[in-house]
Amino acid sequence: GKARPRRPRVVFSRLDLERKRATYLGQLNDPAVRASHCCGSARQLEDGGWLVSWGDNPLVTAFDPDQRIAFRLRLPTSTFRAVPVPAGAVTIAELDRGLERMERRR
């Protein structure tokens, strides 16, 4: 969506490589994201939802399996990639300690 007169979006297509066709299936967008310079990412979550980084933008958006916004994360600086943390990779206590350390740095 760089330099386009619309908001950035995630587009879903079904590819038919034999016939060399792409069929548009739908899109995701977040009204809070107005522009993107480049390079976003979309990763499907275990439950069928999506985690989206909008490309050189500080917002990351999670969508539930029904494509509704589940949450928005505003980072202190821009990012171009968001990678979901697999279930069980970190405990709530470890996450809490990490957030507390970040808070103390301010």
Image: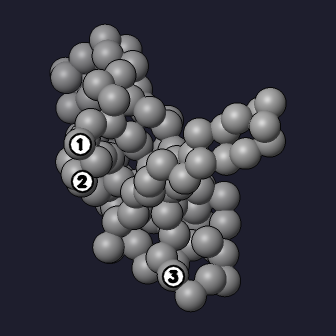
Horizontally, residue 89 falls left or right of residue 14, namely: left
Q: Position of residue 95 (x, y in %)?
A: 27, 29
Residue pictured at 28% horizontal, 56% vertical: 72
Q: Is residue 25 above or below residue 78?
A: above
Q: Position of residue 75 (x, y in %)?
A: 40, 59
Q: Nearer the viewer, residue 101 or 59?
A: 59
**Which residue is labeled 3 in the image?**
6
Q: Quadrant of the N terminus?
A: bottom right
Q: CA distance from mark 2 to mark 1?
A: 9 Å
**Amino acid on which disc 2 is placed:** Ile
**Which residue is labeled 2 in the image?**
69
**Which residue is labeled 1 in the image?**
66
Residue pictured at 28% horizontal, 48% vertical: 67
Q: Position of residue 92 (x, y in %)?
A: 19, 23
Residue pictured at 35% horizontal, 53% vertical: 61
Q: Nearer the viewer, mark 2 or mark 1?
A: 1
Horizontally, residue 19 falls left or right of residue 89, namely: right
